[in-house]
Amino acid sequence: MDKKTAMESLARKEHEKGVFNGTWLYAENGQIISKGAFGFRDAEDKLPMQEDSIFEMASITKQFTAAAVMLLVRAGKLRLDDEYTKFFPEYPYQGVTIRHLLTHTSGMPDDFETADWVAPILEKENRIPACSEILRFICESGEEAACAPGEKFEYTDVGYCLIANVVEKVSGIGFEDFLKKNLFKPAGMKDTAILHTRRDGRPSDRFTRNMVLENGRYVPSDISEENRGYVVGSDGLNGCDYAYTTVFDILAWDRALREERILTIEEQRLMYAPMLLNNGEIAGADDEDDGYGFGWSIKEEPGLGLIVRHSGGMPGLRTWFERFVDAGKVLVILNCREFMDARAYRGFREGMEAIVRGKEPEPLKTVEEMAVQNPDRSDWGSFCGSYEWEDYKIDIRLKGNDLFAVFSLKNKAEPEEKLFPLGEKTFALKTDTSDMVFVDGGLILYSIEGKKTE
């Protein structure tokens, strides 16, 4: 298989479907096999995407935060099993260690949402709160722990913000400066930095804008009506996001790790070891991954060995970084426009991964292309009503010949979305990759049944 041509063809097709707008790179043993760029860096389609365009990394940043911790462990300034209260005594949850925070097993309340505290400060005080303020928010919330430390895996950005504050405290320098001095510069990542572009501005037009669809057109997420409070309000945080980079710098990071210029192989292997919960189960294990370590999802695959990877997401942004540790391969995908169809985008990523493995990608299909044509609508009226889960509600409505869903999270309703029939009782959304299945008295989404209330 000609992987270069296959990846370029897939990226072009996906771009033409309104799904991919960004850059990609695939390398084997340090040699670039395929790379490219499609689309634009701005919402006005005036700045063409370049291969060296600079993207926000979102949660891929977590691996750098974890690497900073490993350097401080090596220096004897902290231990993985140090309790967080050793550094910040006012932290209200006892028994939570640095290791728990790195592996999302702290047991902190699972309803801590970044937007819950940053957006009100932005709105009422017209300022972007600093990462150091997150501890005050946690203390003032008065929330009890969701469970004991190590009892369950609950992915959260907040834990990594707390770690960033520890890095600053024990190192004696700012988080941004610590990573630049100890990670980015020695790795040869010349275009990578921790930045706060909504607060301080973008240093050049090589920086992409994260763009969302609003009222039928693309707008930067930091000025969109729906997303501004969260996107701008959270821009002062550290640890969980706000590393900016290029696909070429990500390759440089991979080479620095392989050559042990930053971390030893032993230190890296510790980061790639999945956390065990108190009951012996593996934290973060699911249908796609074998577990979660320190800022990395982990997978073992026959013929390829150890694979570590992480995705990233913000409104209008999707990123993907996958390292085939034993096989010497690297795949990076950076996308900065809200995609028209979530399943098509997942098909793109899975298609790129298939090409890495020497397999032909599945044909790309949007939800509209997958939908049943001329479906039997006789039962659709019985699907209408409200369905409730622990954290959200979905109202199903019939308008004309189509079903629509309105999601409400914490009593805040989202714009209605059209449902596309995939079967007699199975439907799909453009914005999500999970099937919605109607059953007697309920609706199954994400494998959890919501009960019909009216």
Image (spheres, rainbow, N blue to C red):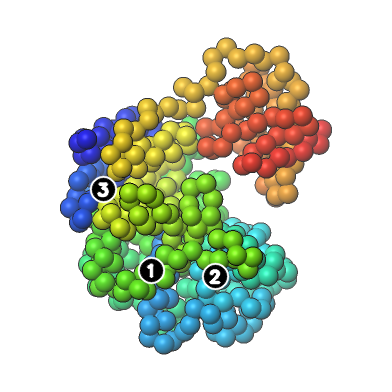
- In the picture, measured across the screen, residue 36 lies left or right of residue 343, that is left
- In the picture, measured across the screen, residue 68 lies left or right of residue 166, that is left
Between disc 2 and disc 3, whose residue precedes? 3
Residue at image location 82% in from the left, 33% down from the top:
454
Q: CA distance from mark 3 to mark 1?
A: 23 Å
Q: Is residue 75 visible?
A: yes
On the rendered image, what quadrant is the N terminus found in? top left
Element at badge 1?
Answer: helix
Q: Residue furthest right?
A: 454
The reply to whether the C-beta atoms of the residues labelled 3 and 1 are less than 8 Å apart is: no
Three-letter amino acid code of the residue under disc 3: Tyr
Q: Position of residue 89 (x, y in %)?
A: 62, 85
Q: Position of residue 62 (x, y in %)?
A: 44, 64
Residue underneath mark 3: 26
Q: Is residue 382 above or below residue 164?
A: above
Q: Position of residue 263 (x, y in %)?
A: 32, 73
Residue at image location 61% in from the left, 42% down from the top:
446
Of tags 2 and 1, the one toward the viewer is 1
Which of the two residues, 103 or 392, is positioned nearer the viewer here? Answer: 103
Q: Is residue 117 visible?
A: no
Three-letter amino acid code of the residue under disc 2: Leu
Three-letter amino acid code of the residue under disc 1: Arg
Of tags 3 and 1, the one toward the viewer is 1
Q: CA distance from mark 2 to mark 3?
A: 31 Å
Between disc 3 and disc 1, whose residue precedes? 3
